[in-house]
Image (cartoon, rainbow, N blue to C red):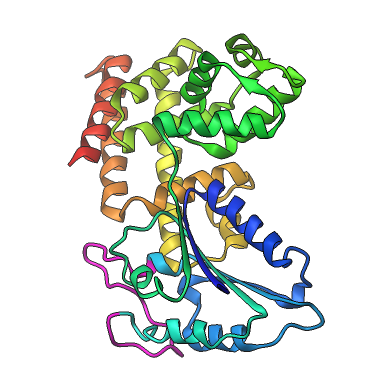
Amino acid sequence: MPAHVLHGDTYLVQRRLSRLEAEAGAEDVLDANRHRLMGLQTNINELVAICNALPFIDSHRLVVVEGLLATFERRPGRGRRRSSDNQASGGALGGWEGLDQVIAGMPDTTLLIFLDATLPDTNPMLRHLREAAEIHGSPTPSGEALARWIKATVEEKGASISPSAIGSLTEMAGGDLWSLDNELEKLSLFAAGGRIEESHVNELVHLARESNVFAAVDAMIDGRQSMALSLLHELREEGKEAPYIISMVERQLRLMALARDAVDRGIPQGELGSHLGTTSQFVIRKTMEQARRHSWSDIMWRYQRLLEADLAIKQGKLEPDLALELLAADQADRSRR
């Protein structure tokens, strides 16, 4: 089938995208035959023109559309999708009702791939494309599924790993598959075909401070209060003062707000770094993932609670450690509502 929808964890989605390109022989197509479009900036007429064009010299034309399906999700106080000036509007899908027919009429030389974060089964466009495209959902693994993923990934790298080492890794990196894959690469090389033990993890894995802050914020907004408290206490034990930790969490919430704005405005992937004010691909990737999961009102509520905790510390109303614990509890409780 020439059309695919890949949604879920960005690491797993990118891996599947690479496999699809390789299977179709499209990984080395010329730039003239390679197109990457942003959902909010794309209209159906533009997509039709690109998909129906025969490739120049190459055997395939690769068309990747990012974030289109997510724009059809209902959000409180917002419409399904903003229509561009040259896009037909109206109808449940805002002028995109014929996308399945577009796909059916494409030449076999076109490989059309839609990339998105995890989508619910009720997504209107996802349901619309079920007969026209192959749907591949790849949610971030957790619990036993994450342990199996680590074990399989290590085996692919030519080594093995003990259960205790798997436990230590998941505590350090959570469900960030990009960071885990990087650490597993280093550990596999160190093990040289042998077994990775917990002692190797403790000796070699030194996740960046930003990774810990990301993990703490993730734990807060995902409702994992005990994990959030554990990570915040680790930062305290490393000698980080409460005002510094709050400033780092504040920075991340501010980045989430900028990222939410980027999602709503359809800012291209290549411009996200300048919009967020960072060149770190890790920061960009993690922040965009967080922003897509939360509304403006949710981000602003969390930001306000953070400012209140900071003020309580500065005015001497709360001890720093207690303020951090209450902040983690408030943030986690918000996620359970």
Q: Nearer the viewer, residue 292 or 307?
A: 292
Q: Residue at x 61, y 9 (%)?
A: 199
Look at the image and give the residue range highlighted in magenta.
71-92
Decide whether the magenta segment is chiefly helix, strand or loop.
Answer: loop
Percent x, y for residue 116? Answer: 47, 60
**How far from the left and from the top, in percent, is residue 52?**
61, 88
Identify the residue at horizontal 29%, vertical 41% (top origin). Answer: 302
Q: Is residue 153 left or right of residue 335?
A: right
Most extreme residue toward the left, as rendered? 337
| Residue 132 showing in the rendered view | yes
Instruction: Answer whether residue 248 is visible to the viewer in this image.
Output: no
Residue 203 lies in what quarter of the image? Answer: top right
At 70% across and 24% down in the image, what residue appears?
188
Q: Which image quadrant for residue 265?
A: bottom left
**Figure quadrant of the N terminus:** bottom right
Vertical comparison of 48 with 298: above or below: below
Q: Which residue is more in the foreground, 84 or 133?
A: 133
Query: Left or right: 54 with respect to 319?
Result: right
Is-magenta flag for residue 153? no
86 magenta-colored: yes
Quarter placement of the C terminus: top left
